[in-house]
Image (tube, rainbow, N blue to C red):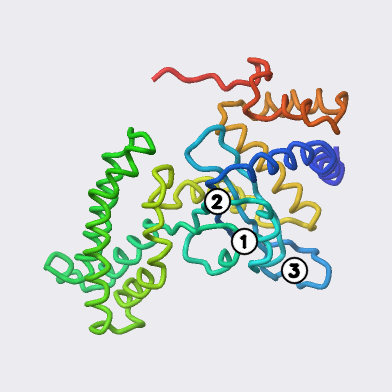
Amino acid sequence: MSRQTLANWILYGANTWLSLLYDRMREHLLKRDILHADETTLQVLREPGRAAQTTSYLWLYRTGREDPPIILYDYQTTRASKHPRQFLSGFKGYLHVDGYAGYHGIPDVALVGCWAHARRKFDEALKALPESKRSSPVAAKEGLNFCNQLFAIERDLKECTPEERYQIRQERSRPVLDAFLAWLRTQKPKVLPKSAFGQAILYCLNQWEKLEAFLQDGRLEIDNNRSERAIKPFVIGRKNWLFSNTPRGAKASAIIYSIIETAKENGLHPYSYLTYLFKKLPNLDTKNKDFLDQLLPWSESLPLTCRAIKKNT
């Protein structure tokens, strides 16, 4: 079988059949009130009016800690803010993001910042110092310690209910945040803005409203690592296949990754699940949303053959 024939079958399967589930999954995603978002680069060789070397983007949108998990990838030619606004049209709630300004201005959405990014800034500032100074008391280490305190509290709250988590954060995390903000304001006049330490200070101050937003609801998370983990399979895959040939192929890749990664998070075996879908979809009334819902990765109607076998530990 030729490479072109294989490619055509993949495009047909994704854009004709799997796209039906993708669109239905998006409808379910937009009904949630807590989501995560991230984006990464993608090269598409034959985009109309663009050079082959031009950078395109794959956007990621996924659910939070509440089940069932949904992961969706969206191919777009740019990193412009119009893309998340369009994809999330109709969504109302909290959106976990990093510091990228492209997520600003989405109607009815409150942004939640990422403390993992903030912590990383201070860690990088500490590593930028001569090795002889890293073990001595330095301001960058103080900033890192504030971040570490917040993460230590979160580890203690791992098994808490959202209500318990909210209350304990007010009691334990709020004082740390207040002290950290006062410290940041004290440090700002003392640092070189373009130094690694200065960048860490400015990042936290500029992102402060989003960074403290996790206190507003016990279901929110302190970081956006959930989306970074979800985008990693695509990043690893990209190292192997390097690029998409056409926009149609890039869209198909986004759909296939969405179905497979959502299936994996819902405890399904991807190959068995896809086999089941391609047997069922051509014979169903695909305009009937109830029928489509029976095929979604979290549906209890799926046969046991779709379930991944849990390994004994």
Q: Quadrant of residue 105?
A: bottom right
Q: Identify which amino acid the numbered label 3 is placed on.
A: Ala
For label 1, the crowd category at 10 Å Cα-Cα, with few meaning under 14, some 14 to 19 and many 20 or more, is few
Q: Position of residue 51 (x, y in %)?
A: 76, 73
Q: Identify which amino acid the numbered label 1 is placed on.
A: Pro
Residue in front for this viewpoint, 44 or 17: 17
Q: Give me the disc on residue 107.
A: 1
Q: Nearer the viewer, mark 2 or mark 3?
A: 2
Q: Position of residue 275 (x, y in %)?
A: 74, 25
The residue that label 3 is drawn on is 52
Q: Give me the disc on residue 263.
A: none
What residue do we see at 32% from left, 73% from top?
201
In the picture, the quarter occupied by the C terminus is top left
The answer to whether residue 223 is left or right of residue 236 is left
Q: Position of residue 225 (x, y in %)?
A: 44, 49
Marks 1 and 2: CB-CB under 8 Å? no
As measured in the structure, the alpha-carbon distance from the residue carrying label 2 to the one carrying label 3 is 38 Å
Q: Give me the disc on residue 93.
A: 2
Label 3: state its secondary structure. Answer: loop
Furthest toward the left, the residue is 136
Q: Position of residue 184 (x, y in %)?
A: 26, 72
Above or below, comparing residue 149 to residue 124 in the picture? above
Label 2: state its secondary structure. Answer: strand
For label 2, the crowd category at 10 Å Cα-Cα, with few meaning under 14, some 14 to 19 and many 20 or more, is some
